[in-house]
Amino acid sequence: MRFYDRQFITREIAYKGILQRFEDLLTEYFQSDKPQTIGLPSVTYCAEQLNLSANYFGDLIKKDTGKSAQEYIQLKLMDVAKEKIFDKNKSVSEIAYELGFKYPQHFTRVFKQRVGYTPNEYRSLN
């Protein structure tokens, strides 16, 4: 019993705030110039920033949210993209590059898959 407490309960306490730290990491990432220099954030990058192995980190996120870490990153990415779409002074290509996409077509495809509309359709709806 002592072994169980030491191994699992201690870890639970240590990683209780991991989701909030992950959320803060993504927010800071997209507010910085890292998307333009590094590209899109990966699960491995996020895990390293939080001092965890990628597999363990993925398991924690899946357990907390029911989504994989990659899905969670893409959801956050789409939230940021939706906000940026409303800036009519920027083209969809400029927004794609700001978010870390190498190709605007890839951004448009991912946006359509996740949101159900192309970036231009979404912009005209709102």
Image (cartoon, rainbow, N blue to C red):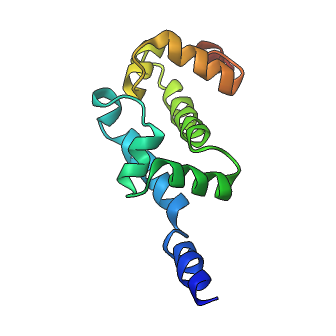
Question: What residue sits 42% from the left and 21% below the top?
Answer: 101
Question: What residue sits 67% from the left and 45% below the top?
Answer: 67
Is any part of residue 89 visible from this angle? no
Q: How many numbered marks, from 0 up?
A: 0
Q: Position of residue 66 (x, y in %)?
A: 71, 50
Q: Position of residue 106 (x, y in %)?
A: 52, 14
Q: Is residue 47 above or below residue 40?
A: below
Nearer-the-camera pick, 21 or 124: 21
Question: What residue sits 68% from the left and 26% below the top?
Answer: 115
Q: Quadrant of the C terminus?
A: top right
Q: Quadrant of the N terminus?
A: bottom right
**Quadrant in the picture for residue 108:** top right
Q: Position of residue 43 (x, y in %)?
A: 47, 41
Identify the residue at the far bottom of this view. 2
Q: Position of residue 122 (x, y in %)?
A: 64, 20
Nearer-the-camera pick, 116 or 62: 62
Q: Relative to residue 106, is residue 125 drawn left or right? A: right
Q: Relative to residue 99, is residue 1 drawn left or right? A: right
**Quadrant in the picture for residue 68:** top right
Question: What residue sits 66% from the left and 27% below the top?
Answer: 114
Is any part of residue 54 visible from this angle? yes
Q: Relative to residue 48, is residue 70 drawn left or right? A: right
Identify the residue at the far top of this view. 105
Q: Is residue 91 above or below residue 80?
A: above
